């Protein structure tokens, strides 16, 4: 197993281990790495090299997708600091947050029920704004305050919001067909 | 083969030599083979100057096989033994085929993939496709006058693992070395992107004879990145023919048609459909075996109405792909039309309306896939100097998952993940002392296992008996660059490796393929042994060349002892390759592989470090 694959994902892309990320650099280095290791470059190579190429191209894809997605990036950073956000088991959320979630759900159900595509669009935009706000908050918590447990709370909230996003998407799809 | 891509740009140390490779579009209705000639991709024609090979294979009791136009001419006379649109049956069972009652074939359901009973015996769709591929391979052999290094064979982007594996098996049966299974919309994007030097986000709308794909790609500085793909692998131009056929049957008050009459009317329906792309109406005339005459005229507007819902069926996956890509139609720079069926005016209109722009039709929709495949084949064969290739980043079209309690699916790898991709899943035992477990792998985006494609069942045996929940079985799912899944497993708490038996739910075992190869040789003039020996010799030659080239560049990564050890294995291989013991060559190829394993890893490491260091120097300068 080549040395560099055991590196931290941030090191692999030559990026500082922060939530706030230079997306352009992430994309550029990803392209350079895949140009070196992608199986398309090893089609006629001996089997040993093809196997290594597959492992490494897969690894580069995993690293890229982890850093590209804000929630996964945050979870990865937290893990680096020894925090396991316990997404599966820790579902306890503050009451006001849960009430907000219920309100969102009701709004989505109502819009879906009355086949109101424009309302769903608006909900989608509002949700997008909410997500942006939370990403900024996580960035501040991790990069500036070193408040990892606070960040873990925010990430858990984010996962709820992402689920809402999927529900809006499903509702819009149902209206289209 | 020289590993041009792993050396520094411009420092290739292999002798310059053009390697012959082709791109093959194995289509539902027509197939094509193309290659690069003097830097331009060209389709290879048959003896009569025709670029298309109708994907039609005719079987007879005497064992002879007819192909293409000749077979097509027999379609109405002998529909049961003239197999058309075999692509619709690849990797499919009887229950998957739409409108099967109108197919004249004698289908036999078999585990995983149906078979067809013909005058020449029971045949598999894989064998039928292999005949088509063989004909294209022969066309290429004659046109190029040399040994083919390999072929890029295209598949619909929405093909699942079973359909892809069947295609790869067919190519193997036809004696082709598959360089890559390439998704059709991606192939079209290559032909289009390079031809027009386009940059930006493009949609490729590919409506073929039997399959529909929609892919959203971003083209940027030599990188083709698929953002999302969707489609319907059971929807195509054939369904438009069928709708018109039903209209004819109803209008003419026909009933209980013989297979010959059904076939004749379907052919007329297709001709009318094609005519309606350029005329306001089309006449359908036929004399049936009963003596009844059919004489109808269908207008373009009627055809549009009766096929309106088929067009609508293409728009839902299109919207879904856009959503998966996180894009609105406004962000799509252009939509490329691929496939003969996109010539229909109402298809053009619907796509134009959805994307709010006129679709792009610059390239011949019948040829664009084969041309793109030829361009990619040229790159993969190693003909382009390193630094000048483009990068294709494709995705898996359908999620992969496992069956859990209650017949539900738990997703392990989600759709539109960039390939190659892997994911590990940990399992544990349910009962004390449990020593085996069964895992069912499926593909699809539905919630119920019964609505997804069954890919494989594994049995993990030899789990050391432990308390329930103590065992840790790590199962790794790996999808390669062809979009094919392989699975491996190990029990991690003990020193014992569990053995895994993966039973594919579809597809052919190695024994079955060997048997098919033997059967096909009995009909052809190839000698089985000579062929197998030649294949091993070619592989040995490739391996020797690649290893020597690697040593020329990176021998400094090895100790003197390691260089000697590798040298000894290569020398032994060279000697055996000159002989005729096919098995001994195979064994020695494995020896060389094992001996060069660590070297391969070190070379890769160096190459990646170079790529990153080169970047660091740049960023310091800027």
Image (cartoon, coloured by chain):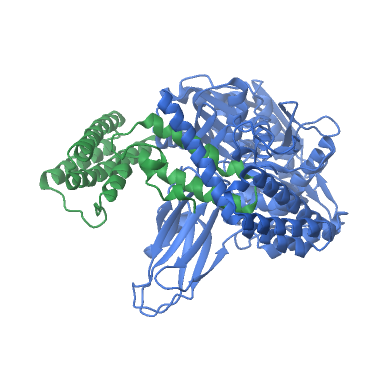
Chain colours: A green, B blue
- Which residue, as the protein is rendered here, is positioned at the far front? B560
Q: Answer above or below: position of B352 versus B265.
A: above
Residue B578 x, y percent position in the rendering: 83, 56
Q: Is residue B261 left or right of residue B603?
A: right
**Of the pair B45 and B62, the residue shown nearer to us:** B45
Q: Position of residue A159 (x, y in %)?
A: 26, 45
Give the residue drawn at x 59%, y 41%: A40
Q: Position of residue A127 (x, y in %)?
A: 25, 34
Pick whichever, B484 or A135, lies toward us: A135
Residue B324, percent across and down? Answer: 41, 37
Instruction: Using the image as rendered, state which of residue A32 and residue B491 is in the foreground.
Output: A32
Question: Would you say B213 lies left or right of B445 here?
Answer: right
Outermost left residue: A95
Number of callouts in the render?
A: 0
Residue toward you, B140 or B474: B474
Q: Is residue B500 above or below residue A157?
A: below
Quadrant of the rendered image containing residue B2? top right
Dividing the picture into quadrants, the one containing residue B185 is: top right
Vertical arrangement, residue B337 with respect to residue B447, above or below: above
Give the side of residue B144 with respect to residue B12, left or right.
right
**Is any atom of residue A10 visible in this view?**
yes
Residue at x-position 61% and y-position 36%: B240
The residue lying at 83 percent from left, 53 percent from top is B60
The quarter of the displayed image where residue B343 is located: top right
Please indicate whether residue A145 sits to the left or right of residue B105 in the image: left
Quadrant (top left/top right/bottom left/bottom right) for the C terminus of chain A: top left
């Amino acid at each position: 197993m080549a040395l560099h694959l055991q590196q931290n994902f941030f090191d692999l892309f030559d990026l500082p281990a922060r939530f706030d990320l230079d997306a352009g650099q992430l994309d550029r280095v990803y392209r350079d790495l895949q140009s070196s290791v992608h199986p398309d470059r090893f089609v006629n190579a001996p089997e040993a090299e093809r196997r290594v190429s597959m492992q490494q191209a897969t690894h580069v894809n995993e690293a890229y997708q982890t850093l590209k997605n804000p929630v996964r990036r945050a979870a990865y950073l937290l893990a680096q600091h020894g925090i396991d956000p316990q997404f599966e088991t820790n579902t306890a959320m503050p009451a006001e947050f849960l009430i907000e979630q219920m309100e969102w759900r009701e709004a989505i159900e109502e819009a879906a029920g009355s086949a109101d595509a424009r309302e769903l669009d608006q909900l989608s935009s509002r949700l997008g704004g909410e997500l942006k706000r939370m990403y900024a908050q996580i960035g501040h918590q991790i990069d500036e305050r070193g408040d990892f447990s606070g960040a873990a709370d925010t990430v858990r909230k984010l996962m709820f919001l992402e689920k809402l996003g999927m529900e809006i998407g499903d509702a819009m799809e149902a209206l289209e067909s | 083969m020289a590993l041009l891509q792993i050396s520094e740009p411009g420092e290739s140390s292999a002798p310059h030599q053009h390697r012959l490779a082709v791109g093959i579009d194995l289509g539902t209705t027509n197939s094509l083979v193309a290659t690069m000639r003097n830097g331009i991709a060209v389709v290879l024609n048959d003896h009569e100057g025709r670029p298309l090979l109708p994907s039609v294979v005719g079987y007879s009791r005497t064992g002879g096989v007819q192909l293409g136009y000749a077979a097509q001419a027999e379609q109405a006379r002998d529909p049961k033994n003239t197999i058309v649109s075999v692509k619709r049956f690849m990797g499919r069972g009887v229950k998957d085929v739409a409108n099967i009652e109108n197919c004249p074939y004698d289908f036999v359901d078999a585990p995983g993939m149906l078979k067809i009973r013909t005058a020449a015996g029971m045949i598999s769709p894989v064998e039928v496709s292999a005949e088509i591929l063989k004909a294209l391979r022969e066309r290429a052999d004659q046109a190029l006058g040399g040994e083919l290094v390999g072929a890029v064979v295209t598949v619909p982007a929405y093909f699942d693992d079973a359909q892809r594996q069947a295609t790869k098996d067919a190519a193997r049966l036809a004696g082709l070395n598959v360089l890559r299974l390439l998704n059709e919309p991606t192939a079209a994007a290559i032909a289009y992107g390079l031809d027009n030097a386009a940059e930006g986000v493009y949609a490729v709308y590919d409506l073929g004879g039997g399959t529909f794909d929609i892919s959203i790609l971003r083209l940027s500085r030599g990188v083709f990145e698929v953002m999302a793909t969707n489609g319907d692998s059971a929807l195509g131009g054939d369904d438009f023919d069928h709708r018109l056929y039903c209209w004819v049957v109803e209008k003419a008050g026909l009933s209980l048609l013989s297979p010959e009459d059904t076939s004749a009317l379907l052919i007329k329906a297709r001709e009318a459909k094609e005519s309606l792309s350029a005329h306001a109406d089309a006449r359908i005339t036929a004399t049936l075996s009963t003596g009844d005459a059919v004489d109808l005229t269908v207008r373009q507007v009627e055809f549009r109405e009766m096929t309106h819902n088929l067009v609508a069926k293409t728009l839902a996956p299109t919207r879904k792909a856009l959503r998966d890509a996180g894009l609105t139609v406004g962000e799509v720079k252009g939509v490329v039309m691929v496939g003969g069926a996109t010539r229909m005016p109402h298809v053009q209109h619907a796509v134009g309306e959805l994307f709010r722009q006129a679709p792009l039709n610059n390239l011949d929709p019948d040829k664009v896939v084969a041309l793109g495949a030829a361009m990619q084949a040229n790159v993969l064969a190693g003909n382009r100097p390193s630094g000048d290739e483009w990068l294709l980043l494709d995705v898996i079209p359908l999620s992969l998952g496992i069956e859990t309690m209650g017949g539900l699916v738990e997703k392990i790898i989600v759709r539109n993940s960039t390939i190659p991709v892997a994911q590990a899943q940990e399992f544990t035992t349910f009962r004390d002392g449990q020593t085996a477990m069964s895992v069912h792998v499926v593909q699809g985006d539905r919630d119920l296992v019964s609505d997804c494609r069954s890919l494989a069942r594994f049995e993990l045996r030899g789990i050391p008996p432990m308390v329930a929940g103590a065992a840790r079985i790590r199962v790794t799912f790996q999808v390669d660059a062809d979009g094919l899944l392989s699975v491996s497993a190990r029990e991690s708490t003990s020193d014992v490796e569990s053995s895994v038996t993966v039973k594919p739910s579809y597809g052919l075992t190695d024994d079955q393929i060997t048997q098919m190869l033997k059967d096909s040789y009995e009909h052809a003039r190839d000698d089985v042994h000579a062929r197998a020996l030649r294949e091993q010799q070619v592989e040995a030659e490739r391996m020797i060349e690649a290893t020597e080239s690697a040593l020329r560049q990176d021998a400094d990564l090895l100790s003197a002892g390691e260089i000697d050890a590798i040298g000894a294995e290569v020398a032994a291989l060279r000697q055996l390759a000159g002989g005729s013991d096919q098995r001994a060559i195979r064994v020695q190829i494995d020896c060389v592989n094992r001996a060069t394993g660590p070297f391969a890893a070190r070379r890769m490491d160096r190459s990646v470090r170079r790529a990153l260091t080169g970047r660091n120097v740049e960023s310091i300068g800027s």
